[in-house]
Image (cartoon, grey):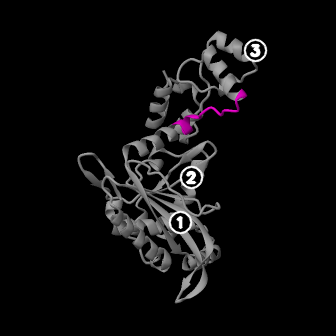
Amino acid sequence: MSIIMATPAARKAAGDKRVDLARIHGTGVTGYVQLSDVLAFKGFSATPLAQAVAQYYNVDINQIDSRDTIGKEDVLAYKQAMQDNVIPLSGMRSVIARRMSESLTNAPQYTNHGSIDAGELKVFLAQLAQQSVASGGIKPTYSDLLIKAAAMALRDNMIMNSSFMETHIKIHEQINVGLAVALEDGLIVPNIKNADRLSIGQITAERKRLVGKAREGRLAPEEYSGGTFTISNMGAFPVDDFTPIINLPEAAILGVGTIADTVVPVDGNIGIRPIMRMSVTSDHRHIDGAVSGMFMKRLKEIIEHPTCMEDSNG
């Protein structure tokens, strides 16, 4: 009997869905079956009656998601959903829905909003991009600088890099900053391990690698687990600010809006500056507003004086 090579997360998901791993094509290294392979698998068994009903109504039975053998009722429910223009939930979207609901149910959350002058950050990013092009390296993005800045601010406010554990608060020694990555049927949060100890160039390379694997459905479990803080960057969209939901068991999440030219006071006069809006949602069970405020104050200092990121590699 051949051994099916699969990640622990894939085995658990296959068990939950009652899917035979031998029927799933693995996309991992040397054919390993990954969680994304299980979530994408649609080859569930169906009763003869269900197959006949599907054929009669011209329904693609492979598009029906079910934990058990597909029956006639599943086919009819799927047909009705399609007639009502209802999109059946994918495995990934179901997981996201459950985790977001659990987050809001289990953790009392509040959000602080603030503004950051991103003028120096824009100049700094342009300089780094020019240097990377000249050296044949990878051009950094705003997300890379935000990951570095957040990691530095977390290092100075370690209670934000923690988890509420019912009987105690766990302060994580590692600062593993996750970046929410939008996929076709949901999102996933790969995280950069020990981000506070990495240079901007190292963060850029690791971010590009992880995001690429995420969009190809090839992330290994250890690449999207173990995060201690998450960033959701909506700067590419016309979003000023928003209220992100904590990715439990993490204690906080940073939401970043677009950079917009804004009329603000400048040295006693009125001027126009590129302003970035940020939102920090925290777990109120152990993080009070003042603590989140101190973290935001430090983050603002770093972003408004970005050259300090070059001098901080742990």
Of helix, strand and loop, which one carries label 1? helix
Which three-letter amino acid code belongs to the residue tagged 1? Asp
Which three-letter amino acid code belongs to the residue tagged 2? Val
Residues marked 3 and 1 touching at CB (< 8 Å): no
User: Can residue 89 be found in the magenta stretch?
Assistant: yes
Q: In this rendering, does residue 214 appear at all?
A: yes
Residues marked 2 and 1 touching at CB (< 8 Å): no
Mark nearer the N terminus (3 vs 1):
3
- Compared across the picture, whether 56 is left or right of 96 comes to right
| Crowding near the residue tagged with mark 3, few <14, some 14–19, many ≥20 C-alpha atoms within 10 Å | few
Between 201 and 245, which is closer to the camera in this rendering? 245
Which three-letter amino acid code belongs to the residue tagged 3? Tyr
Residue 257 image position (x, y, % from top left)? 57, 63
User: Can residue 284 be found in the magenta stretch?
Assistant: no
Residue 261 image position (x, y, % from top left)? 63, 75
* Image mark count: 3
**Which disc, if any, is residue 181?**
2
Which residue is pictured at 35% across the width and 60% down the height? 160
Which numbered disc, 3 or 1, marks the residue closer to the eye? 3
Q: Taking 51 as reference, is 131 above or below it?
A: below
The residue to which callout 1 is attached is: 144
- Give the residues in magenta: 83-94
**Which disc, if any, is residue 58?**
none
The residue to which callout 3 is attached is: 56
Of helix, strand and loop, which one carries label 3? helix
